[in-house]
Image (cartoon, rainbow, N blue to C red):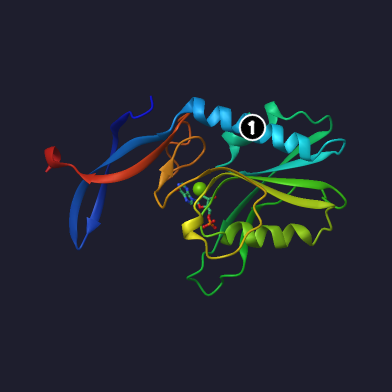
């Protein structure tokens, strides 16, 4: 479906006091096969780097689920365990910047363990920056970070990223775990989401 685009749902937006019906336009940026072959390469590099070691893979809910599952299936490491966290960043504009809100914490201690954080996308870097600081307090043996997508242009906080799947220009993307208003996570490909005025529905 490379190059495919189509209209999905309609959304209502209030713009300058005017109520507008907008179409959500999806344009495929990265197809399913391209994602799968990149994930395979990442899995090979990660397996090589943890040779003879045990590994705890920590997926960041909910966006990382697709990537985490596909990556896990391709890892060639004997002792792999998994856990999940759910976090939200307060962002950089609020007073409480510098903290993250942990909605779901790890199930076990990571003391002395090799931790690999698996994330969908790094944007400003705020979420991951604070998450790594938080995890290091538990004295893990190592903390590494693998993200499938990276928007380096948008970075506000320096984050040590060990593996990146794809660099993404400053566009809003959905699919393969990534959402807009909790939708589109189920798409097997990555699409750019744009909003266009719905001329027919006026
Ligand atoms: P940040 O790096 O703290 O700014 O936030 C990263 C989080 O923002 C990711 O885990 C996503 O949940 C979300 N996010 C950033 N860019 C996008 C995008 O293009 N599509 C969907 N979610 C995004
Ligand atoms: Mg999200």
Residue 178 placement, left or right of 64: left
Residue in the foreground of this view, choosing between 4 and 139: 4
Residue in the foreground of this view, choosing between 45 and 32: 45
Quarter of the image with the N terminus in it? top left
Residue at horizontal 62%, vertical 56%? 128
The residue wearing badge 1 is 41
Q: Tell whether circle 1 marks a residue whose Cβ is less than 8 angstroms from ligand 1.
A: no
User: Residue 69: image x %, image y %?
Assistant: 64, 31
The image quarter containing residue 116 is top right
- Give the farthest residue toward the bottom: 95
Residue 180 in sight in this render? no
User: Residue 122: image x %, image y %?
Assistant: 55, 52
Residue 170 placement, left or right of 50: left
User: Residue 23: image x %, image y %?
Assistant: 25, 41
User: Residue 38: image x %, image y %?
Assistant: 57, 32
Residue at horizontal 50%, vertical 71%? 94
């Amino acid at each position: 479906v490379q190059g495919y685009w189509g209209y999905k749902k309609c959304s209502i937006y209030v713009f300058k006091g005017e109520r507008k019906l907008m179409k959500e336009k999806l344009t495929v940026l990265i197809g399913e096969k391209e994602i799968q072959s990149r994930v395979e390469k990442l899995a090979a590099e990660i397996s090589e780097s943890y040779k003879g070691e045990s590994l705890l893979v920590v997926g960041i809910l909910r966006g990382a689920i697709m990537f985490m599952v596909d990556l896990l299936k391709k890892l060639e490491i004997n002792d792999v365990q998994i856990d999940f966290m759910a976090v939200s960043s307060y962002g950089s504009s609020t007073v409480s910047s510098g903290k993250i809100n942990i909605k779901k914490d790890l199930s076990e201690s990571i003391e002395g363990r090799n931790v690999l954080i698996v994330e969908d996308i790094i944007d400003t870097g705020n979420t991951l920056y604070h998450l790594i600081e938080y995890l290091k307090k538990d004295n893990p043996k190592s903390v590494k970070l693998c993200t499938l997508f990276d928007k380096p242009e948008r970075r506000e906080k320096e984050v040590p990223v060990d593996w990146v799947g794809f660099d993404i220009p400053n566009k809003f993307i959905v699919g393969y775990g990534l959402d807009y208003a909790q939708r589109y996570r189920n798409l097997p490909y990555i699409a750019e989401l744009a909003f266009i005025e719905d001329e027919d529905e006026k």
